[in-house]
Image (spheres, grey):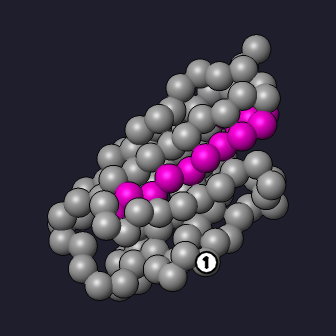
Amino acid sequence: QVQLVESGGGLVQPGESLRLSCAASGSIAGLYSMGWYRQVPGKQREAVAHISTGGSTIYADSVKGRFTISRDNAKNTVFLQMNSLKSEDTAVYYCTIIIRATNYWGPGTQVTVSS
């Protein structure tokens, strides 16, 4: 079993920043990649950022230049630094870890950007 716990969500004003964290625990061994997704009510969950075992990153076009994903392998933790937040970034953000082609998900953390 793999458990993920996100933290760092909250309410901020447009233009402000937030840093999300996600710690993984349990049966984690070998190579794995991690990522962040987000979802708003009535819409499909969308990929935000992904980081490979070796540290290569991929971002959704909507967050490029504003969000940065990073990881601490020693702590099985992934981070999402979100700068210049916009109202359209409002969503529940989910952390995922991919181990041997299986996705495991956290419960999500709410990010609300509003003036």
- In percent of width and height, residue 110 lies at 52, 33
Residue 84 is a magenta residue: yes
Q: Is residue 26 left or right of residue 110?
A: left
Q: Is residue 84 left or right of residue 104?
A: right
Dot 1: few (<14), some (14–19), or many (≥20) neighbours within 10 Å? few
Query: What kind of element bears circle 1?
Result: loop
Identify the residue position indicated by label 1 in the image: 56
Residue range corresponding to the magenta coloring: 76-90
- In percent of width and height, residue 78 lies at 45, 58
Q: Residue at x 24, y 73 (%)?
A: 28
Reply above or below: 91 against 21.
above
Reply above or below: 74 against 105.
below
Q: Quadrant of residue 42?
A: top right
Front residue (pair 58, 44): 58
The answer to whether one can see residue 88 in this image is: no
Reply above or below: 69 against 114.
below
Q: Quadrant of residue 19?
A: top right
Reply above or below: 109 against 33.
above
Residue 78 is a magenta residue: yes
Given the image, on which type of amino acid does mark 1 rest?
Answer: Ser
Q: Residue at x 76, y 49 (%)?
A: 66
Q: Quadrant of residue 59?
A: bottom right
Q: Quadrant of the C terminus?
A: top right
Q: Residue at x 41, y 63 (%)?
A: 72
